[in-house]
Image: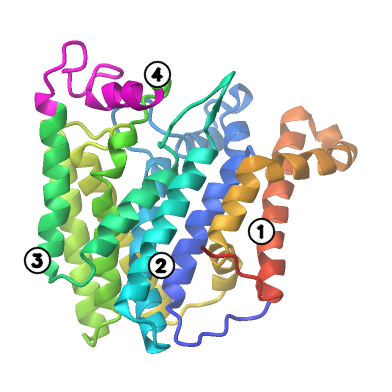
Amino acid sequence: MDTIKTDNRLLSLDFFRGLTMFLLIAEFSSLFEFMISPELHGSIIHTIGEQFHHVDWEGLHFWDLIQPFFMFIVGVSMPFSFSKRMAKGDTFKQLQKHAFRRAFLLLVLGWALYCIDPGRIVFRFQNVLAQLGVTYILAFLIIRKKPMIQIGFSLLLILISEGIYRFFPVEGFNQAFVPGHNFGAWLNILISGNEDTGHWAMFNAIPTAAHTIWGVMAGQLLISERTNKKKIQLLLIAGIIGLIIGYGFSYYTPIIKRISTSTFVFASGGWALLALALCYWVIDIKKYQKGVLFFAVVGMNPLFIYLFAHVGGAELIRKIFLPFSNALFGWTGTLNANIMLSIVVLLFLWFICFWMYKKKLFIRI
C-alpha cells in the first residue's frame, strides 16, 4: 500500500480523523448491532460490542466519545487549514465568509437528514453535522483570541448550560438530569414539536462547542514553534485536567452524553486530548507510520462518506453483496454470515474512500 505524501501534513491528525470516521461509517454497516446479538451474550465479542453502543443515560462507553472526537478533530484542523489558505493569499475576511458558509451548510445538511416526519417537515438539529455547524462557528469567532480568552469562553458556554439545566423554571421540565423532564427536552419540543425518543438534546451544540474550541487550541499548539516534548506535555496536562474535573464532579453532575452535561464535556474532552497526544507521539514523533494510510483515506473525504453511508449507500452495498455472502458464508450460520456481510460492507465503504484518494477526488464544503 502506498504511503501518504506528507506535504507537511500532520499524519497523526490524518490518522485520528480517519479512525474516527471509519468507526462512524462502521455503524452503518450494522456490524456493531450483530456484535451484541443474544447468541453472543457473555462472550468477549458481546462485551466489546457493548462499548460500541451509547449508554442508555448516565455513564460513558467508548462509543459516547466518537462525536466529541469528531468535533474536537475539526477544531484541530482549523488552524492548519486557515494558515494554509492565508499562505495562498486569502484574507481573514475571506476566511470569515468561508467559515460562515461552511457552518450554514453543515447545519442545513444535518437538518436535512432528519427533516421528514410522516406527513410534515420538522426541525431537528441533534445530528452531528447540525451540531458541528454551531460549534464550528463559535470556535471560529474566537480563533484569533488569546488562549485564556478561548478557555474562558469555552468554560462560559459550559457553565451557562449547567445553570440553565439546574435552574430552568418551567414545571415538568425543571428536573435537570431526568430523561424527558429537563430543559433539553423542553427546547426539543419547542423547536420540533416533540421530544426526541432517545432524549438527545438539540441544545448540546452549546456546551459541546468546548470540544471544537479545545481542538482549535490543540491545533494552534501543534502548529506552534514549541518543542515536541512541550506539546506532548501540554496536551497530557490538559487531558488529565479534563478527566479529573469530569469524573471528579460526576457525583454532583452526572456524566450524561444525551444532554451533554458539564462533566460529560470535560471527561470526553479529556479523552480527546489524550488520544491526540498519543497519536502525535506515536506517529509524528516516534515515526511509527505503518498502516496510517488505511484510516487516513477515510478522513480525507469525511463529509462525503458519512452522507453516502447515511442516506442509503451502506444499505445498497449490503443488498448487492447479500446473495454472495449467503452463498459463501451461509453454512456458518445466520449470525456469522451477517457479521461477515457487515465486514464486507465496511471494507467496501473504505474502498470507495481509497479509490477517491487515488483519483485525488476530495469533496469539501
178 or 273: nearer the viewer: 178
**Mark 3 or mark 4, which has the lower sequence index?**
3
**Residue found at x 19% / y 40%:** 263
Residue 209: horizontal and vertical position, in percent? 27, 51
28 or 200: nearer the viewer: 200
Residue 305: horizontal and vertical position, in percent? 61, 55
195 w.r.t. 303: above or below: above
209 w.r.t. 320: above or below: below
Q: Which residue is mark 3?
A: 148
Which range is magenta? Answer: 166-192
- What separation in Å lies between label 2 and label 1 (alpha carbons)? 29 Å
- What separation in Å lies between label 3 and label 2 (alpha carbons)? 26 Å
**Residue found at x 33% / y 31%:** 201
Q: Is residue 157 magenta?
A: no
**Residue found at x 36% / y 24%:** 199
Q: Amino acid at mark 3?
A: Met
Q: Viewer-nearest of labels 3 and 1?
A: 3
Q: Which residue is mark 1?
A: 350
Q: Which residue is mark 4?
A: 194
